[in-house]
Image: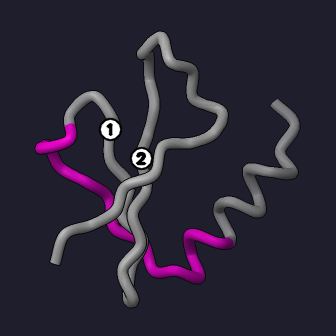
Amino acid sequence: MELLWFKSSHSGSEGGECVEVAETGEAVLVRDSKDSNGPHLTFEPAAWRAFVAFAANARV
């Protein structure tokens, strides 16, 4: 199965430190956009949703 990876809409086009995300039916995968053949992190969908909600409300 080929994964469909998405880059954040907050990522610029000048390169830098960006992540890409792909979803399967059972997991959310996260990788470094500059190293598409490198390792990736795997999250349960509920854990990923909780992280995204937390990050959206974080004040940094």
Disc sitting over residue 20 in the figure: 2
Callout 1 amino acid:
Asp
The residue depicted at 56 percent of the width and 69 percent of the height is 48
Q: How is the image coloured?
A: one colour
The answer to which image quadrant residue 16 occupies is top left
When the figure is inspected, residue 49 is found, relative to residue 60, above or below; the finding is below
How far is disc 2 from disc 1 in space, using C-alphas? 6 Å
* Side of 22 relative to 52 (left or right): left
Horizontal side of residue 5 vs 3, given as left or right: right
Answer with left or right where residue 39 lies relative to residue 42: left
- Neighbour class for label 1 at 10 Å: few (<14), some, many (≥20)? some
Q: Quadrant of residue 12?
A: top right
Left or right of 56, for residue 16:
left
Q: Amino acid at mark 2?
A: Glu
From this view, report whether residue 12 is shown above or below residue 47.
above
Q: Position of residue 9 (x, y in %)?
A: 63, 39
Residue range (magenta): 36-49
Point out residue 22 in the picture as x, y percentages from the top left corner: 39, 63
Residue 57 drawn at (x, y percent): 87, 51
Q: Residue at x 32, y 38 (%)?
A: 32
Badge 2 marks a residue whose secondary structure is: strand
At 36% from the left and 80% from the top, the residue drawn is: 24
Find residue 40 and report its image quarter: bottom left
Determine whether label 2 and label 1 are within 8 Å by CB.
yes
Which residue is rendered at x = 81% and y = 30% of the image? 60
Q: For the N terminus, give its image quadrant.
A: bottom left
Tag 2: Cα neighbours inside 10 Å, few (<14), some, or many (≥20)? some
Q: Label 1's element?
A: strand
Sequence order check, earlier mark of 2 and 1: 2
Q: Which mark is residue 32?
A: 1
